[in-house]
Image (cartoon, rainbow, N blue to C red):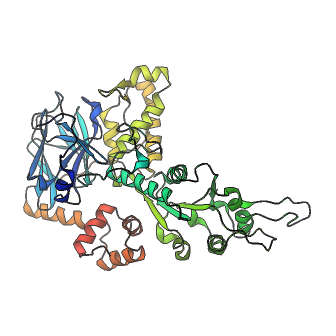
Amino acid sequence: MSTGDTTLPADPAARIAARPERCYAVVVCQCIAEPERCGEAALLDPSSGADEWIIGRDSGVAFVLQRPGELLDCGPLGGKLLSREQLRFGFAGDALRVENTGSQRAFVDGTELPRGSSVVIDVGTVIEVDGHSTFVVELRPPAIPVARRALLPLPPFGEPCAMGFAAESPAAWEHRDEIVLVASDAKAKAAVIFGETGTGKDVTARAIHALSPRAKKPFQPVNCAEITPELAAARFFGTRKDWPTPGTPQTDGYFGEAGDGDLFLDEIACLETRTHAVLLRAMESGCQRVGETTTRPTRCRILAATNKPPSSVAEDVLMRFGHVIVCKPLRERPSDIAHVARAALLRQVEGDAELEGKFLRKDARGRPYVVCDQSLMATLLRHPLTGNARQVGNIVTAAVKEARGTGVIRWPASVPAPAARQLEPAGTSAAAASAAQAAQVAPGMRTREQVLAALERNHWRYAPTAMDLGVSEDQLYRLRKKYGLDDR
């Protein structure tokens, strides 16, 4: 088996055409023996002809670095604390199953999986090999399309890109691709960004600005939560000289200050209904200072963002945005938690002589990393992380603070840890069928009518439909397949 550095396969188009849309992937989020392996994935692709895969020391399935247009074969994992046959993956019906076949202790979602035992797992499952490695299960496409020219050259694997994102999942590269697409659309006058707290909406808006022809023009951020209906016109469009009282200077308003650049309307869903007419007037016919009768054309591009679902934005406002971008939460791309945490740890440790001496090291590729206990990464992967990258940063800050006294960077005692999962053996076909059924519809048990209505409401755009339904894109994919709903 190859352990070299060649890009696979030799004829990507032919092999990709025969592959499924997505397959299960077991992604390394921490490898104590080989820290440079963080982010590598074992693709459990049935089209390869295999029906089971083994992760073991210097044997079994090869891990790959999956990047746009590249699939770099890195070979099996190594390290003394990994058995030659440690974990065996296969299918129980339509569900994925894992068995602990090694002598090293293994844990699934925080609960020990005894040697010789197996359990049905799904996307988001966290698997630990004690003292050696931590993995998370994802659904991934077997290959990532070639990156747009504006994204080249690619940054070193795992390091933050020029946009400011530390992420390597296929979903993260798709997001970068969307940013370039919006930035390069010279005719686009408006784009809206949806995403939960901490998913990078502000970073996305600034990246669109930086990569567009408007990059040297102003970037004007506005917090819509602070705009009242009574002051909306004056704040957006400005006021003429001597209005409302003699001696008052002329103001340009947010649209005037943005000029030929970008006006970033953060938390647009907070605008009251009475304010919508003011915003729509600017988007449709232009700007008019309060107290004037002359209308000036709107020159800026409008970028809007909100942490609420698309249904929270008035339809007449939403339909004016030609581009819709959804910043996916970390729970839908859990392998990126490892890269976000690694970057956060480096920010905390680098520049502090005491911490650098204790915790800062370089991996086999020469990249700096911070030595931390397995409990930190494993618990981060199982934590709800409703605050996404922002919450990861807060937890890492607490962990490093406590490490000054303990000498170990571990899960901080000040932060409640999630409960471990209660495992049920995958020994019976009934249990496997039940798990497979649950994986297809949970959570939410959305009906066919609900899914179809949401797809039509969002013009069959995948990401905003998933956000509108309150499910992940993986769950929407399963629901669409279950109900036989094809893209229109």
Q: Is residue 196 above or below residue 243?
A: above
Residue at 18 percent across and 46 percent down: it is 9
State the image quarter where residue 346 is shown. Answer: top left
Front residue of 367 and 188 = 188
Residue 283 placement, left or right of 459 = right
Residue at 38 percent across and 64 percent down: it is 463
Residue at 46 percent across and 51 percent down: it is 387
Q: Is residue 142 above or below residue 440?
A: above
Would you say residue 480 is visible in this rendering? yes
The quarter of the image holding the N terminus is top left
Residue 202 placement, left or right of 248 = left
Q: Is residue 486 above or below residue 440?
A: below
**Total of numbered circles in the picture?**
0
Front residue of 408 and 370 = 370
Would you say residue 401 is visible in this rendering? no
Q: Please provide percent x and percent y for residue 443.
A: 30, 65
Q: Is residue 359 above or below residue 12?
A: above
Q: Please provide percent x and percent y for residue 17.
A: 19, 59
Q: Please provide percent x and percent y for residue 93.
A: 11, 62
Q: Please provide percent x and percent y for residue 376.
A: 35, 37
